[in-house]
Image (cartoon, rainbow, N blue to C red):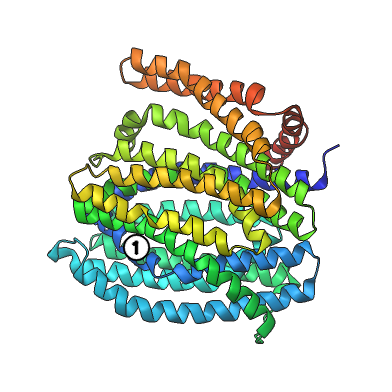
Amino acid sequence: MISETNKRIAKNTIFLYIRTFVSMLISLYTSRKILEALGISDFGILNVVGGVISMLTFLNGSMSVATQRFLTFELGRNDKKSYNRTFNMSLIIHLGLATIVLIAAETIGLWFVNTYLNIPDWRMIAANWVYQASVLSTILGIVQTPYHASIVSHEHMYIYAYVGLGESFGKLFLVLLLIVYPYDRLIFWGFVMFAFQFLIAIIYRVYCGRKFPECKIHLKWDKTIFNSMAKFTGWNMFGTIAWLLKDQGVNILMNIFGGPVANAARGVANQIAGAINGLTGGFQSAVNPQITKRYAACESGAMCKLLCESSKISYLLLLFIALPVMMEIDFILELWLVEVPPMASLFTCIIIIEALFGVLGTPMITSLMATGNIKWYQIIVGSSLLFIVPVAYLLLKIGYPIVTALIVSALFILLGDVLRLIFCKKQIGLSLRKYVTSVVFPITAVTILSSVLPFFIHYNMIEGWTRFLLSTFVTIISVAIFTYFIGLTLTERSFIVNAILPKLKDFIHIKR
């Protein structure tokens, strides 16, 4: 018999998966139009300038994880009063963080954009305007964090599905406006996206106010909760800084050694990888609250089981799309973009491989965060990630190609997964042998076996629509067959047949 928890995970997964799939299709089209409307240089400026303000939000990144963890933990204990105190304390903290980021952005960040970034002189004014739009969007995102965390902790994923679909179609409309806009399109895009995000923020706030009584605002300082969240945030901040240096540090290195063209290529690659990775994000978003709640309920065995299952399924879901895309990436980019940035196809494949490594680590991160004991985890894993930028810099400095930075990043992400496994064994009792036999072996076998026939087709046919359609079809079927018979256990197959398929049929019936 399928538990109510598994049914809820299946329902939330379907909502988020359908939303993400539609959003991915729209995102791929709009990304092409944005690149077409802005041009390679302005598109690269948009990516690198937006990255600078992201680097200033490292404290909010740590605080967001703490907010999500503490709110979900209180729901796992079924303590609504404590939930309300935690929600309001997190709201106060995020308002303070927004103020700090605003000050830093208008001083250090502004100085960095105008002093160190490789931006043509004639586009500096536009770059500064886009930077200001990014600052406003970032401040909005910070104060919105407790509301997002509340929706996730209550597992009301359908609101993300509906609003997400509206957001995608709204962005499509804005892109069409961008194409016909007669003035500076880079500035227009920055500020119109801020206005759009502001509207979405209002929707989420109204929803939380009406659906969750425990999210009522009573801004009262709670020293005990603040100390607990501050301690957690303090140790988590180290890991957050490492992640920001990994993402934005590599982005800046590529700007220094390759200029805006390299940033444009990475921007295109990130758009594709992000759209693909988003398909597994729906599943992980549905599972993560349950991992934390099971720890809060002292069900460590069930949590470890869910960790292994979600790691494997997340990887296999990503493989369904990642493998066919990597097989035909050159054809896809030529079909998708009017002007393909140099090295975009190679960048995309490496970033997708990094995403496959990274998706395995997400359930482990959630499990370790649930314990609240993250001091040495963040010190060890964060320190390993901090080596990415200096190692990549040294290799680029002595003459290695620009793609080296992405390869170094992917290898260190894999190392991070290994280190997380060791900490999961120590802190939550995860069996390394069980993880290897139930996760590593199945996904390795599925990856290798499902690649054989598609590779044969790819290298023995001329590029074109015939190879693209045949290769994609064969790849998806191969992954599906080997996943079902090798990747999944009998229990997991039963879960798909008895839980996911009926929910999917119900969803389709409702839409009709």
Which residue: 45% across, 82% down?
99
Three-letter amino acid code at disc 1? Gly
Residue 147 seen from this side: no
x, y (%) of residue 163?
57, 57
Residue 320 seen from this side: yes
Residues 482 and 399: in front is 399
Which residue: 53% across, 80% down?
95
- Number of numbered discs: 1
Which residue: 44% across, 19% down?
454
User: Left or right: where does residue 405 sit relative to residue 361?
Assistant: left
| Residue 306 versus residue 170 in the image, above or below | above
Give the structural element (helix, strand or loop) at label 1: helix
x, y (%) of residue 205?
61, 70
x, y (%) of residue 179?
29, 52
Which residue: 65% across, 64% down?
372
Q: Quadrant of the C terminus?
A: top right
Q: Which residue is mark 1?
A: 50
Q: Quadrant of residue 337?
A: top left
